[in-house]
Image (cartoon, rainbow, N blue to C red):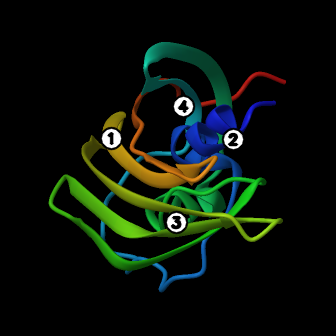
Amino acid sequence: MSRRLLIAAAVAAPLLGVSATVPLAQSTQTILPGYWEYTSQIRFGVSSSDTENRCVRQNEINRFFNGPSNRHYTCDYPTRVVNNGRMRFEGTCRDRRGRTVGVVAAGTYSPTEFQMQAELDTRVLGITVRPTGTIRARRLSATCPA
């Protein structure tokens, strides 16, 4: 997988990982558990997109709202605001080799859908690059397929 796609994955597949921040208060309504479809897109010169379906269990919801992350990157978001249908994250993700990516992401959410736009800031071959990405998701059903 190319570095560009790994960077995109740090933002575009947030349900696959965990970041270490304070959990949301139980009273904060975010998204509902169930079967979700999400489409991610990264723009870096050319545009590429991917659509996946994922079962989101109740105990996984806070993972997403702690900030975008995945199995390739460990992320820290000193700025994390999730309130009244809006979310914003600012932080840094680091891969296993120590390479870093700055992330600024913001979006909206409701119990059955969310969308997020992100700007990334990194260096490739000594050159600063700033790809952008989006993720749009919708809940397909309250239950997941067997």
Image depth: mark 1 or mark 3 in front: 1
Disc sitting over residue 116 in the figure: 1
Image depth: mark 2 or mark 4 in front: 2
Disc sitting over residue 62 in the figure: 3
Say which amino acid is labelled 1: Met
Residue under label 4: 142
Q: Quadrant of the N terminus?
A: top right
Residue under label 2: 6
Q: How far apart are the two marked residues, 1 and 3, measured between alpha carbons?
A: 16 Å
Q: How far apart are the two marked residues, 1 and 2, measured between alpha carbons?
A: 18 Å
Q: Is residue 62 left or right of residue 16?
A: left
Answer whether labels 1 and 2 touch (C-beta < 8 Å): no
In the image, residue 65 above or below residue 119: below
Looking at marks 4 and 1 on the same chain, the residue that comes earlier in the sequence is marked by 1
Answer whether labels 4 and 1 touch (C-beta < 8 Å): no
Question: Helix, strand or loop at disc 1?
Answer: strand
Q: How far apart are the two marked residues, 3 and 4, measured between alpha carbons?
A: 18 Å
